[in-house]
Structures are given as structure tokens and as C-alpha cells.
Amino acid sequence: MSPISGPCRRKGQELLHRQCWNWGRDIVRPEGNLLLEAGFLKGRPPRGETGSSCYTLALPNGDSLMLWGFGLLYGTPEQGGVYLNRYRFRPVWMPSETIQGPIWRPDMIPAGQAPPSLRIPVDLTVAAIRRVADYEEWVLAHCGLEYRRAVLRQWNRPSEQPSPPTLPRAWRRLADAIDGQPRPRHVRGR
């Protein structure tokens, strides 16, 4: 059972799918790779291997945000990490020591484990979502609204998702909705 409600998972899946598209467009922006400008470091698969590049942002508090075309991983030294797949917005928790090393394919994501508390993946998911909202606010401030609108015009899927100026707010509303859910209980047997 997921610690995140069905409506929040559906909204998160919609937003993350589109966000991965946005990040892909930000990478190939004619003026230069926007993720690199935002402070992410790019890691490529080893020569001869197929897979997605990984963009990692080291945050001042020791946390990190890793992005791929297939999803994101938000990790902290204290609580471990949470992986969110682009197509299935179900947090997969893993201890900090299991999220080391380069990852370039979804099958390289370590298997999820039962957290000491179901609240940990919820808290990590909320933190990840807020980092995505921060990034979208930075993009709007750095590149302007017309840049994000141009990216959205390239999105070929009909969508009722938020317009570019309201995208950061949509991410923050989702974080607040997830954070406001009833508190999950501790995992049995721990």
C-alpha cells in the first residue's frame, strides 16, 4: 500500500511526466543546458552502455536531487532517499547507503525497502516536490514566461495541467496535499 493517496498519486504522475518533458527541453535549449546553469552536474552512462544521463544537484544541507528521463530520486543523509518513476508516482524508499554509484537505467534503481516509518517516504516526497517547484520558479525568473510557454507548445499531449506561470504553485499544492494526509503508522515488525 502506498503512503500517498490515489488522487495525489494521479496528480503527481501527471505533473512529473510533464516535468520530465520540461527538463528534457531545458537540456537541449539553444542558449545552453538550463540544468547545468541551475547547478546540476551531468553524469553519462559509461562508453558502450545505453541509458539516460543523470543530472545531480547537491543541495547545501547535504541532500541531493537526481534527475533522469525516467524519473527522479531525492536523497538525504539522514532519512535515505525516495525514487519517483515518471510513469508511476509511487515513492520507493531506500536507505542512504543503497543510493550510491552511477545510475543510468531504471532497472539500476535499488529495490525499495520497508522504511522504519511510512512517514519517511512521504516527507522525502514532499521535499522532492518542493525542490521541483523551486526549480520551476527559478526557470520562470531566469528565462521568462515565454520560454516555458514555448516548451509547452512542443508538448503534444492534450492536458488540463497548469499553465507555465501556475506550475510552481501546482507542485506546491501537491506537496501540501501529500503533507496534509493522515499520518501513516509505523511499519509493522519494526
Image: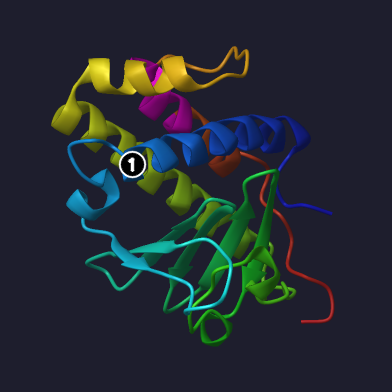
Seen at 41% across and 24% down, the residue is: 167
Tell me where the magenta segment starts and ends, as one range: 164-172
Q: Is residue 69 visible?
A: yes
Picture quarter with the C terminus: bottom right
Callout 1: SS: loop
Q: Nearer the viewer, residue 26 or 137?
A: 26
Give the image location of residue 64, x and y in percent: 37, 66
Give the vertical position of 154 relative to 28 (above or below). above
Give the image location of residue 39, x and y in percent: 21, 57
Overall secondary structure of the magenta section: helix
Give the image location of residue 145, x and y in percent: 24, 17
Splitting the image into 4 quarters, where does residue 61 fall?
bottom left
Splitting the image into 4 quarters, where does residue 91 fall?
bottom right
Give the vertical position of 107 relative to 20 (above or below). below
Q: How is the image coloured?
A: rainbow
Residue designated by label 1:
28
Picture quarter with the N terminus: bottom right
